[in-house]
Image: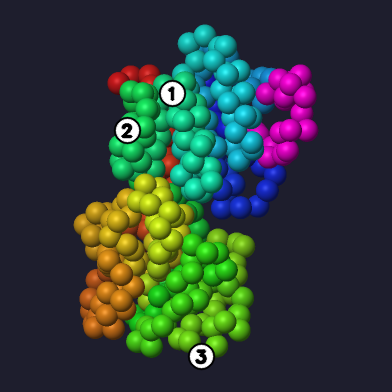
Amino acid sequence: MRIHITNINGFVDVAMKAQNRTARVAREELHCNELGIFCYDVDTDTPEMLCARLDGIIASVSGGDIVIFQFPTWNAFKFDEALIKRLNYYNSLKKITFVHDMKSLMFENNRYLLSREIAFMNQTDLVILPSQKMADFLYGKGLTVKKTVIQRMWDFPVAVDQSFRPKFERVVNFAGKPDLEKFRFVKDWKYDEVELRVTAAEGDWARGKNISFLGWFDDDTFLADALRHSGGFGLLWSEDPYFSEYMKLNASYKLSAYLAAGIPVVVKSSIAEKDTIIRGNLGLVVESLDEAVERIAAMSREEYDRMADAVAVFSNLVRESWFAKRALTEAVFKVLYD
C-alpha cells in the first residue's frame, strides 16, 4: 500500500503555499508520494486531452492505496470532479479529502457550487475539515461522509530569532491588503490610542491617521521577522458580512502567521478557534475594534508578557508543522483502523 497526496503548482498565492507545505510534510515526515497538479485553463483541454492529463497525474496509484486530495485544486471545478471520477475506477482505493478552502463559501457569487462540492466530498471515505463548525454546517447541507478529522489551524513553518522577545507595544499589526473590500476597516482606522501597522506599501490614504507600514513580504520568514520585531498584537479581522461568516467556519492562515511570529492576537469572538485563544491565553477575543483598542490601551506590560510567554510555547506547534502531521496521521488511522 502507498499513500499519495495531491499538490498544486503554477501560481503564487497563499493557497499554493498551504498545499505545498502540507505536501512537504506528507512526503518528508510520512513518506507519501506526491501527485503534482498544474493550475491552468482547463477549457483549453478537449475531453481526450483531459483524460490523458489525469491518467498521467495518477499513474503511480494502484488499487488498495490511499489518496489524499488537497481540495480544491484551484482549477475550474470540473477538473476536480473529473479527477475524483477517475480515481473511483480503482478497487479498494481509500480517498481522503483535505479541505483547504471552499469556493462556494469564500465568495457569494460562487454559492451555486456548494452542492457540487459536497457531492465531491461524498465520494471519499474521510474529510479533513478546518473546524467543527465547518463540519456541522456541511452535514446540515447534505454531507454524508461518516469519518472526519478536524484540522483546527494551519501550520506556518518559519524560523524566528528566539533570542529576541516581542515587545509590549500598544500596536496591532495587520497582514493583508488594505485595498480589498473585506478589509475596509484598515482605511477606516480611527483610533489614536493604538497604532495600526499594515504589511503593505505606504499609501496616501493613511495620511493623518495612526497608521504605519511594515512593507509587503512575499517571503514568510521575513514576514514573521517583521511582525516579531514590531511587537504588540496580530489582528485577525473583517467587518464584511459575508466574509465574516466564512471566518466562523474556516482556519485562518493569518492567525498562524501571527502565532508563529510569537505575538499575541486580537480576534473576533465568532471565529472558529476562539476557545483555543481563550484557553491558551494567546491573545484577546473581542466583539469589536472599539473593545480591542480599549483593552490594549488599559493593558499592563505584565499582562502582555504572560500572553507572549503562552504564545512562545504554542507557536512551536505551528512552526514545526504539528497540525498537519496530526491531521494526516489521524486521517490514515481512521480510514484503515477506526
Q: Magenta includes 40?
A: yes
Which badge, 1 or 2, is on the more N-terminal residue? 1
Residue nearest the observer in this picture, 219 or 44: 44
| Of residues 69 and 190, the one drawn nearer to the viewer in this rendering | 190
Identify residue type, mark 2. Gly
Q: Horizontally, is 289 left or right of 199 in the view?
A: left
Q: Which residue is mark 2?
A: 140
Sooner in the amino-acid sequence: mark 3 or mark 1: 1
**Residue 285, numbered circle:** none
The image position of residue 102, as x and y in percent, is 48, 41
Displayed quadrant of residue 196: bottom left
Q: Quadrant of residue 169?
A: bottom left
Where 283 sits versus 270, above or below?
Answer: below
Q: Position of residue 51 (x, y in %)?
A: 71, 20
Q: Give the vertical position of 211 relative to 177 (above or below).
A: below
Residue beneath label 1, please? 122
> Could one spot residue 225 in this view of the protein?
no
Please report the bounds of the magenta region as a residue range: 30-54
The correct choice, above or below, for 136 with respect to 191 in the image is above
Measured Cα–Cα span from mark 3 to mark 1: 53 Å
Asked whether 273 falls inside the magenta stretch, the response is no
State which quadrant residue 78 falls in: top right
The amino acid marked with disc number 1 is: Asn
Q: Position of residue 312 (x, y in %)?
A: 34, 64
The type of residue carrying mark 3 is Gly
Q: Which residue is mark 3?
A: 208
Q: How is the image coloured?
A: rainbow
